[in-house]
């Protein structure tokens, strides 16, 4: 896969926040436990927001966030700054952890969370939180997702934001597995092409 | 999954698999395959990281919500617990024969650190090291009887590391389930007590690593909490499966 083009006009505060976060994760990887507090201060509201959105339950979201930071504390060295933005990495970790909990609970929300999430994604609102960077990558994925055919966008959104698997998507839409896969594959192909053009 | 759609222009098969993995769409063997490749193929890990970087802003746009102040206190307490346990597991890691089972048992039994250290020092055999085996990546998907759930195992030979995912399993508060590998001679070797609903990675002793091979049998037994007592026979087999090279 080619390296996607990176934004060039990032907000300098966001860039400073990202650099600080990278430095904190690097410190944590060396065993400096005070770094976790700094990372928590900078990111916990964002990660808790993600967990709460996916799980829809404060207690579950708190447990998920606790797991994330303890996991980070144990394995901060897994973060590769060359591969991902630190907040993307942490946000993805929060999403995955929350979805794992959702599945463990046997309560993957088939429609409510994903549809609401998809609507939220499309509304173009700007987040109030100033700690975390939202740069051109953000505009790019939103724009490109909007370019997809509705069913492709819906499948991708319900999977990533709502935790649905192929099997659940096929059941929810009452279509064969191959149809759902085809929609996702075509959606991914168009997304990649769009992202690389931006 | 046998009904794969035709290849899609503009995406390699790896990009498709990485994208599906990041979106969380995969189950069964495809999920095991993706996990295994992520663990051992830097190019595939790059492909996964690219998709994660593309999709993560969708999450970042969700409103931030301040968690309760008590959450940080819980995390700090967890770090302290981990410090105590880390001291134990460092010693456990020296125990070439019992790494996995002891580490899991420590968690399950909640033993005090000092007592465990004394115990392990007493039973630890000499450390042995071996070259990583040039064996294939293995996966197993073990159906749990009377449930739609599966236990997903992935073996990464270079790291002599086993990943066990038991997503969907819930503890019944009365039993634990213990996973066993059947060696070439037909003897059972405990791989540890399954922690319901979690994904766990653990190391396997070099001695046993040679028995992780295509076709190797696995069985899951139902045991009292904490796993099979030392002085009892293994409990009833509730599921079985075998490793397949992937």
Image (cartoon, rainbow, N blue to C red):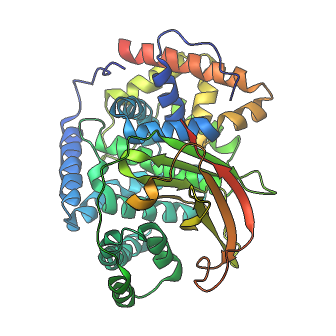
Q: Quadrant of residue B94?
A: bottom left
Whole-percent x and y of residue A116?
62, 39
Measured as percent of width and height from the top left, residue A42 is found at 29, 55
Residue at 51 percent of width and 23 percent of height? B16
Left or right of B173: which side holds B73? left
Query: In this rendering, would B188 be left or right of A124?
Result: right
Where residue B173 appears, as percent x and y from the top left, is 68, 77
Q: Indicate whether B147 appears above or below B174.
A: above
Circle count:
0
Q: Quadrant of residue A175?
A: top right
Q: Is residue A4 left or right of residue A112?
A: left
B201 or B214: nearer the viewer: B214
Residue B83 lies in what quarter of the image? bottom left
Task: Say if residue A96 shows up in the picture.
Answer: yes
Expressed as whole percent of the image width and height from the top left, the position of residue B12 reads 46, 17
Q: Which residue is at a point 63% across and 79% down the rendered structure image? A: B225
Residue B24 in sight: no
Q: Is residue A174 above or below residue B198?
A: above
Q: Nearer the viewer, residue A109 or B103?
A: B103
Residue drawn 57% across the image and 13% down it: B7
Q: Is residue A33 left or right of residue A54?
A: left
Question: Who's the residue at 46% across and 24% down the image?
Answer: B14
Q: Residue furthest top?
A: B9
Where the N terminus of chain B falls, by quadrant?
top right
Closer to the camera in the image, A29 or B149: B149
């Amino acid at each position: 896969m080619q390296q996607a083009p990176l934004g060039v006009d990032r907000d300098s505060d966001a860039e400073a926040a990202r650099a600080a976060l990278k430095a904190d994760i690097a410190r944590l990887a060396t065993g400096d436990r005070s770094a976790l507090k700094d990372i928590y201060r900078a990111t916990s509201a964002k990660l808790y927001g993600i967990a709460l959105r996916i799980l829809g339950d404060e207690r579950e979201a708190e447990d998920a966030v606790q797991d994330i930071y303890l996991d980070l504390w144990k394995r901060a060295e897994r973060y590769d700054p060359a591969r991902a933005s630190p907040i993307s990495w942490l946000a993805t970790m929060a999403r995955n952890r929350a979805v794992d909990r959702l599945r463990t609970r046997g309560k993957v929300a088939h429609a409510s969370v994903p549809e609401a999430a998809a609507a939220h994604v499309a509304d173009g609102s700007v987040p109030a939180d100033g700690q975390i960077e939202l740069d051109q990558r953000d505009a790019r994925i939103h724009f490109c997702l909007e370019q997809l055919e509705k069913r492709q966008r819906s499948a991708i959104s319900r999977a990533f934001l709502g935790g649905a698997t192929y099997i659940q998507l096929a059941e929810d839409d009452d279509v064969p597995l191959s149809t759902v896969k085809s929609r996702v594959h075509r959606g991914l192909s168009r997304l990649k092409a769009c992202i690389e053009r931006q | 999954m046998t009904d794969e759609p035709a290849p899609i222009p503009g995406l390699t098969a790896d990009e498709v698999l990485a994208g599906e993995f990041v979106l969380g769409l995969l189950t069964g063997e495809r999920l095991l395959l993706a996990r295994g490749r992520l663990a051992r193929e830097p190019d595939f890990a790059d492909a996964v990281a690219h998709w994660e970087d593309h999709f993560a802003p969708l999450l970042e746009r969700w409103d931030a919500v301040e968690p309760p102040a008590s959450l940080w206190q819980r995390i700090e307490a967890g770090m302290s617990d981990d410090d105590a346990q880390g001291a134990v597991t460092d010693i456990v890691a020296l125990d070439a024969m019992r790494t996995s089972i002891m580490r899991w048992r420590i968690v399950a039994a909640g033993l005090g650190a000092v007592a465990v250290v004394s115990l392990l020092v007493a039973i630890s055999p000499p450390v042995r090291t071996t070259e990583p085996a040039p064996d294939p990546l293995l996966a197993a998907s073990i159906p749990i009887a009377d449930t739609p759930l599966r236990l997903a195992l992935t073996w990464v030979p270079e790291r002599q590391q086993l990943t066990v995912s038991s997503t969907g399993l819930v503890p019944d508060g009365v039993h634990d389930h213990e996973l066993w590998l059947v060696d070439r001679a037909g003897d059972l070797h405990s791989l540890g007590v399954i922690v319901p609903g979690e994904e766990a990675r653990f190391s396997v002793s070099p001695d046993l690593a040679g028995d992780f091979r295509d076709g190797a049998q696995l069985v899951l037994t139902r045991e009292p909490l904490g796993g099979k007592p030392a002085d009892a026979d293994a409990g009833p087999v509730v599921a079985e499966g075998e490793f397949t090279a992937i």
